[in-house]
Amino acid sequence: MDHEKTFYGSTVIGERGQMVVPSDARKSLRLKKGEKLLVFGVHEDTLIITKVGSLEKYMQHLTQKVESLKTIINQPS
């Protein structure tokens, strides 16, 4: 499934500031009870929520790309 193009529905902020992730999103993204999520504020009114593990994998990928670029940049012309 192409997650970046999926709309899972809506949620409401409760009295204690909590929200519920829609069931279809939890199932599709394999979110488990107690799983830690990171919440980022971007722009004026946009939130991005991601699993900690997903961010760690992305950071590892970026680190590898940076190292590859350093090798290319440091090669003699």
Image: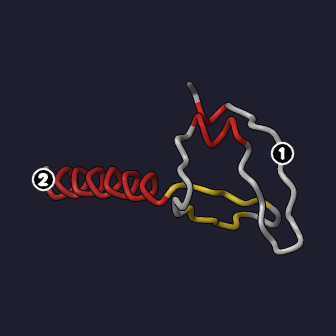
Q: How many marks?
A: 2
Q: Which colour scheme is used?
A: secondary structure
What amino acid is labelled 1 in the image? Ser
> What element does badge 1 sit on?
loop
Residue that carries the numbered disc 1 in the rendered image? 10
**10 Å crowding of disc 2: few (<14), some (14-19), many (20+):** few
Q: Which of marks 2 and 1 is nearer the N terminus?
A: 1
What amino acid is labelled 2 in the image? Gln
Find the residue positioned furthest to the top. 1
Residue at 63%, 57% in the rendered image? 49
**10 Å crowding of disc 1: few (<14), some (14-19), many (20+):** few
Asked where in the image residue 55 lies, by quadrant, the reply is bottom left
Q: In this view, does 26 lie to the left or right of 14?
A: left
Asked where in the image residue 63 lies, by quadrant, the reply is bottom left
> What element does badge 2 sit on?
loop
Residue at 85%, 63% in the rendered image? 13
Who is closer to the viewer here, 54 or 58?
A: 54
Residue that carries the numbered disc 2 in the rendered image? 75
